[in-house]
Amino acid sequence: MATITIDTVGKYEDQNVTISGWLTHKRSSGRIHFLVLRDGTGTMQATLIQGETDEQTLKVYTELTQESSLTVTGTIRKDKRAPGGYEILVSGIEVLQIAEDYPIAPKEHGVGFLMDHRHLWLRSPRQQAILRIRHAVVNAARKFFDDQGFTLLDAPIFTPSSCEGTTTLFETEYFGDRKAFLSQSGQLYMEAGAMAFGKVYCYGPTFRAEKSKTRRHLTEFWMIEPEIAFADLETVMKLAEALMVAIVEGVIKTRQHELELLGRDIKMFEKIQPPFYIISYDEALQILKDAGESFPWGEDFGGGHETIISNHFDKPVLIHRYPAQTKAFYMKNDPHRPEVALCVDMLAPEGYGEIIGGGQREDDPAILKEKIRKADLSAESFDWYLDLRRYGSVPHAGFGLGIERAVAWLCGLEHVRESIPFPRLMDRLYP
Amino acid sequence: MATITIDTVGKYEDQNVTISGWLTHKRSSGRIHFLVLRDGTGTMQATLIQGETDEQTLKVYTELTQESSLTVTGTIRKDKRAPGGYEILVSGIEVLQIAEDYPIAPKEHGVGFLMDHRHLWLRSPRQQAILRIRHAVVNAARKFFDDQGFTLLDAPIFTPSSCEGTTTLFETEYFGDRKAFLSQSGQLYMEAGAMAFGKVYCYGPTFRAEKSKTRRHLTEFWMIEPEIAFADLETVMKLAEALMVAIVEGVIKTRQHELELLGRDIKMFEKIQPPFYIISYDEALQILKDAGESFPWGEDFGGGHETIISNHFDKPVLIHRYPAQTKAFYMKNDPHRPEVALCVDMLAPEGYGEIIGGGQREDDPAILKEKIRKADLSAESFDWYLDLRRYGSVPHAGFGLGIERAVAWLCGLEHVRESIPFPRLMDRLYP
């Protein structure tokens, strides 16, 4: 007798098998009893019939509670009415454990309650769909870079210095009186990698101690960050577009069922094809003005502004050349217009806002040194970074894609907290 | 005129092209001048001939220093004597930057010096070979799990509690007076995932503040950790074996050139086929005794012991059933022999020691609760973890593979510090 998983059930029609899993729910209709089993590969209906199933097994059935673990033995039957097209006619049930009273009922729970029970909440079909889509996003992105000859370089998490502003750093004691800072981005290290390998990327967690309680902020979030030598702003704008197309294609190809479960419109995703919209910061400002939002030139957009701009387009939009003063020290200024940086943000549609940020890096050692000084950063900590401009400096560019924000858009989530297995927010460190 | 990369040079024979890169070195032989160019995809020889190349280009040649960045124009010619089989006959050189005096010369440098210049050291052929093999290891491992239906679940880094002992924790202030600990392993979270998805894995950085200055220790290291529901020790021993076979196959298939550059014996790797050696802790003790190492039953092996045992075998060896007292609280004891745990370590050959550790997890809520109490861990912090045994507990098992140790073995490294792009050790936080 074969021990099988639910995803392979179609191969075992009319055969006697065993399946192990958990009870999601049960119901009775006259003398027929149904239990729905999940095993991580799928869910399926198991059927017991009074008068046909033996008394002992029927007794076990009555004792089963939600999320009890069990092994079911029986015959696989085709049944159009059953979800998935097959059911198992039960001949025996072996109980592994009768679960205690399960805290998550089909009724509505508050977000705080569900987050406190994230380790159990993961068992729900909706959360499983989201996290399987996340897996598909990661796979599509990695495949995209691998296929184009990028080398994966895992960036360090402990760093001696900050790269995205010193006010949002997590720090830890590092053997004695030294401090280590948790990485805010792998970019600076990817720049060193690009000078060695030409094209590199990292995928890993990054950390920002931002006191923001918005639907777009996590204190711990994962980024995929490519960096390319001999590349300019145009190169990475094209690359960012191609990456998002590859990610959307990968997800609709492998996770259509999950997108449908989440109520997403596959047709809308099929339209995510090049060319994306490309506008300048100045043009974005005009969109805000037309929407009645007064906004002074020279400031960065807030979440609300990004929502207005991104709602304006049915595909992702690339916004380039923000005021240099809004961007980090490592950005290169436009030689034709030094008040703007050679940078780009990509906003997802449907009001989701920024999912990618990047641009061309400053490659002149004297200018970079001056920028480090002006940003009030430690010259000593960045000496290695300046070496990249002393020994064969070349034009180079890259970007970072925030995985959670991309997943939130693809899944149509209200808040990024559902896009990561165990979210960490200002007020959330458990479980 | 095509702008090409060195890896595609074979397609452009007798064509006029441009290639951008860095100068690794140059030499002259009579009236012929050679420069060797690297661009991240490979290295190739560029040739200038006095009397044929124009004077201006010959003058530029004389000014070029090691690691200067440049764009070379010329004709691709087949030449058996050239490394790679092709050279470029130079008609023009555009200098991007004449590099300052490059600190890493072909002469021997001390390890401290090279580690201080890790951002430049990455440009050396040996370091590139190692890190490309690392990439191949990661890809092979992820493909292995993806192909078998595992779901990738990125584990959190910030955790409210410890899982591998409280003495080696890095901690950070987390908004106000709370403390967050940096993850020592994603395992506990993968257990929650296994109860939801059946089979899961994570790949990410983990942190241990160990005051160990051995060749096997990093404070920040990456692990891939699978976890499976309805699985026992035997299941994960088989899985660990299959994973290592897949990794070795993936590396010799895609990175043979790099293995050869590192002086590794491909034939030895081709022998890494099932079955691996499987011995008990008690049998391992006998090997130590036979080698003249007196060792009391009940203690964990040190690095030196692992070296002796692993030198004893020409393939990886799995050692199972260590004394329970040497293992973490979450391990299940053998019901037939409660003084040993249902655990397994895999040691790599050639004296490399432990690369995998894992086993079957305690699934009884009462026993686990008692173990948490005995380990002096906070009951409150682990309440969520106990939930996994309250709501449908099932036998489950998993393991962690340390990527750096696997790479160190595959590459034949003296020390794990070369197996990761930017190593972090007790006394190393820069660059």
Image (spheres, coloured by chain):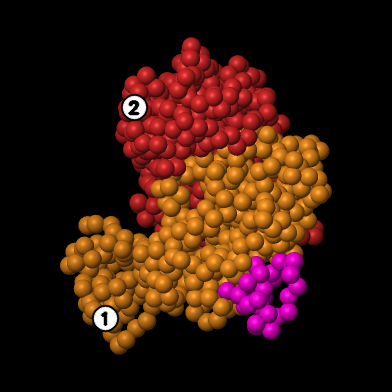
Chain colours: A orange, B red
The main secondary structure of the magenta stretch is helix
> Disc 1 marks which residue?
A81
* Element class at badge 1: loop
Q: Is residue A141 above or below residue B284?
A: below
Between the C-alphas of marks 1 and 2, the distance is 68 Å
Front: mark 1 or 2: 2
Q: Residues within 10 Å of mark 2 (few under 14, many from 20)?
A: some
> Disc 2 marks which residue?
B78
Q: In x, y percent, where is residue B302?
A: 57, 27
Mark 1: amino acid? Arg
Mark 2: amino acid? Lys
- Which of these two is toward me, B69 or B187? B69
Q: In x, y percent, where is residue B47?
A: 46, 24
Q: Is residue B293 above or below residue B37?
A: above
Residue B160 visible, this orientation: no
Which region shows up in magenta? Answer: A281-310
- Which of these two is toward me, A213 or A292? A292
**Residue depicted at x 61% and y 51%:** A360
Residue B135 visible, this orientation: yes
